Amino acid sequence: MGDPTPLEARHLNVFFGERQVLHDLSLTTAPGRVHGLIGPNGAGKSTVLRALAGLVRIRSGNVLLAGHTLARLSARERARSIALLPQDTALDADFTGTELVLMGRYARHGRFGALNAHDERMAAAALTQTGAAAWAHRGVGALSGGQRQLTQLARALAQEPSVLLLDEPTSALDLKYQTQVLELMRAQAARGCTVVVVLHDLTLAARYCDDLTLINDGRVHSHGSAAHVLQPSALATVYGIDVHVATDPVTQSLRVTARERTALQPTNDKERES
């Protein structure tokens, strides 16, 4: 699978029951880059990520992995290339962190393949990279939300994927681990991995992503560099709140700050009457 575009969504239409959640959505990724998906709650970002992983039934359109239709590949073939860190990190309490991360290695062997010393080294390296080695001997049911998130990330890294999909990987983390995870994400891209990440923090998205796709109501509103996508007028339209966008003097990337809600013009008849 040596296609220069390893993962591509073409004109995706996805329904949950009668409700359409993705509308003719297209997205192109490239190896060695971090692609950020941003947008308000309920915009369809997580659905896009799950569609890219082959976990959502697509009414029409296609997802291509290195030029191959993803739906025609086996689950094992997909797992050898794609790793997904979901937003929900609920885990089986019967496993330790090490055991959970080792499960990521089965993509390299098949369901009943025997793990070996190399697998153990890869799992240990992933635990160390994410900082999860400190609690790897503990049952995952006893871990905090942030610890579970880092352990799940270690499992995804242990798969050695060429495509890494991350759904809000910093949502349960403190400032130290947020920075560590996002720098690790960039390090994976530097090694040639394609990274697609959902982020709510627009300032972090601007700092760590090579390009952004702003999604609203299941559609691509805009795509491109942070400077192109993070336009105050566009963000006001999509998020429904006025924002200030400026260059951070420390990071030299864009910082997005929400203004007071009262600074917005009335948005409906009830507000106009008040």
Image: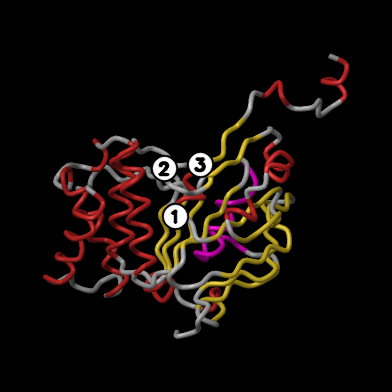
The image's mark for residue 201 is 3
- Note whether 116 is above or below 197 in the view shown: below
Task: Report the residue at 45% width, 60% height from top.
Answer: 165
Residue 152 pos. (x, y %): 32, 51
Residue 158 pos. (x, y %): 27, 63
Front residue of 103/183: it is 183
Cα separation between marks 1 and 2: 26 Å
Cα separation between marks 3 and 1: 14 Å
Quickly name the residue at label 1.
166
The image's mark for residue 267 is none
Mark 3 residue crowding within 10 angstroms, few (<14) / some (14–19) / many (20+): some
Residue 11 pos. (x, y %): 70, 68
Residue 161 pos. (x, y %): 36, 69
Task: Report the residue at 53% width, 58% height from top.
Answer: 49
Residue extent of the magenta highlight: 41-57
The furthest residue to the top: 274
Work out whether mark 3 precedes mark 2 in sequence or the reverse, and give the earlier one: 3
Quickly name the residue at label 2.
250
Q: Secondary structure at mark 1?
A: strand
Task: Residue 46: say if magenta.
Answer: yes
Task: Identify the image quadrant of residue 148.
Answer: top left
